[in-house]
Amino acid sequence: MNSILMIVLILISTKLCFAREWVNKDGRKIEADYVSSDGTTVILLRDGTEIKYPLAKLSLPDQDFIQTQSQAKETKTKSDVENVAHSRPTGRLS
């Protein structure tokens, strides 16, 4: 039973990357996983190698995708912080 749970967790964790076809403004395409973005540069993962690419050189739909991913991550981070803040004990600890 534990091995089945481990396999399921591994399969789920591998889907956390956002594999997709990326297109730059010149129409060139690359298949890669989305890793992160700092607002000016995007980090993609292709064949185990991280690629840093200027966000402004990507197609507008890809820029929109990255903005959506960044907003979703920011919302989740705020939610996580709020949950931690609300779960703190408010009295003295014995």
Image: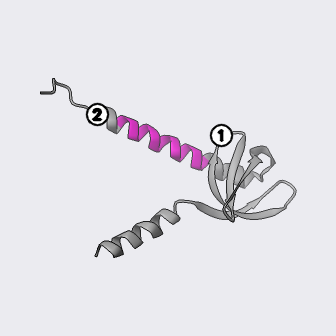
Q: Is residue 65 left or right of 81 when viewed as pictured?
A: right
Question: Can you say whether 37 is above or below 17 in the image?
Answer: above
Sequence order check: which comes first, mark 1 or mark 2? 1
Q: Residues within 10 Å of mark 1 (few under 14, many from 20)?
A: few
Q: Residue at x 58, y 49 (%)?
A: 69
Q: Which mark is residue 86?
A: 2
Question: Can you say whether 49 is above or below 68 in the image?
Answer: below
Give whichever of 64, 3 is nearer the camera: 3
Query: Looking at the rendering, in which quadrant would you find the C terminus?
Result: top left
Q: Amino acid at mark 1?
A: Asp
Q: Residue at x 34, y 74 (%)?
A: 3
The chosen color scheme is: one colour
- Read off the magenta span: 68-82
Contact check, label 1 and label 2, Cβ < 8 Å: no
Q: Residues within 10 Å of mark 2 (few under 14, many from 20)?
A: few
Give whichever of 93, 87 is nearer the camera: 93
Q: Position of residue 15 (x, y in %)?
A: 52, 65
Question: In the structure shown, which secondary structural element does the residue marked by tag 2 occupy?
Answer: helix
Q: Residue at x 45, y 44 (%)?
A: 76
Q: CA distance from mark 1 to mark 2?
A: 29 Å
Secondary structure mainly formed by the magenta segment: helix
Q: Amino acid at mark 2?
A: His
| Disc 1 target residue | 38
